[in-house]
Image (cartoon, rainbow, N blue to C red):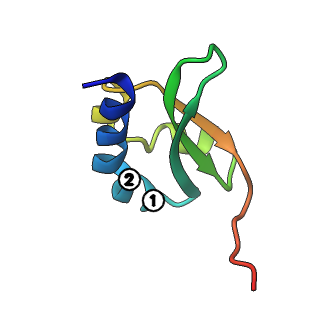
């Protein structure tokens, strides 16, 4: 299993739980600051408000990056 496949599996496992956290607006995969693949969690609130709400099981399994993206709304 490649790193990307492993991260996709982890993202899929935790996505519903993460999206249930108030302030989380997106969950995806991308590159972190050092170019390493990670799970990126988009937030509508300052990331510090989300960090303590992340599942402990997720933190030890994958690199996680929180990014403030603001509110996401559907456009017509």
The label on residue 19 is 1
Residue found 37% across the figure and 44% down from its top: 11
Residue 12, given in percent of the width and then of the height, sits at 33, 49
Q: How many marks?
A: 2
Q: Tell me where residue 29 appears, x and y as whole percent.
A: 51, 39
Q: Relative to residue 19, is residue 76 drawn left or right?
A: right
- Residue 20: image quadrant is bottom left
Q: Which quadrant holds the N terminus?
A: top left
Q: For residue 19, which quarter of the picture?
A: bottom left
Q: From the viewer's perspective, is residue 63 above or below residue 56?
A: above
Of residues 21 and 40, which is closer to you in this image?
Answer: 40
The secondary structure type at the circle numbered 2 is helix
The x and y percentages for residue 74 are 69, 77
> How crowded is the residue under tag 2: few (<14 C-alpha within 10 Å), some, or many (20+)?
some
- Residue at 49% from the left image edge and 29% from the top image edge: 38
At 31% from the left and 26% from the top, the residue drawn is: 61
Q: Does dot 1 land on a helix, a strand or a loop?
A: helix
- Check the image and name the residue furthest to the top: 34
Q: Label 2 belongs to which residue?
A: 15
User: Mark 1–mark 2 contact, CB under 8 Å?
Assistant: yes
The C terminus - image quarter:
bottom right
Determine crowd level at label 1: few under 14, some 14-19, many 20+ residues with C-alpha closer than 10 A: some
Percent position of residue 24, x then y: 55, 55
Q: Is residue 26 left or right of residue 10?
A: right
Q: Residue at x 66, y 19 (%)?
A: 33
When the figure is inspected, residue 55 is found, relative to residue 69, above or below; the finding is above
Real-space Cα separation, disc 1 to disc 2, in angstroms: 6 Å
Horizontal placement of 41 versus 67: left or right? left
């Amino acid at each position: 299993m490649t790193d990307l496949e492993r991260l996709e599996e982890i993202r899929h496992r935790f996505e519903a739980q993460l999206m249930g956290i108030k302030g989380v607006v997106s969950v995806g995969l991308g590159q972190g600051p050092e170019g390493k693949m990670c799970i990126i969690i988009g937030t509508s609130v300052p990331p510090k408000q989300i960090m303590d709400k992340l599942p402990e099981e997720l933190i030890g399994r994958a690199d996680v990056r929180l990014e403030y993206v603001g509110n996401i709304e559907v456009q017509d």
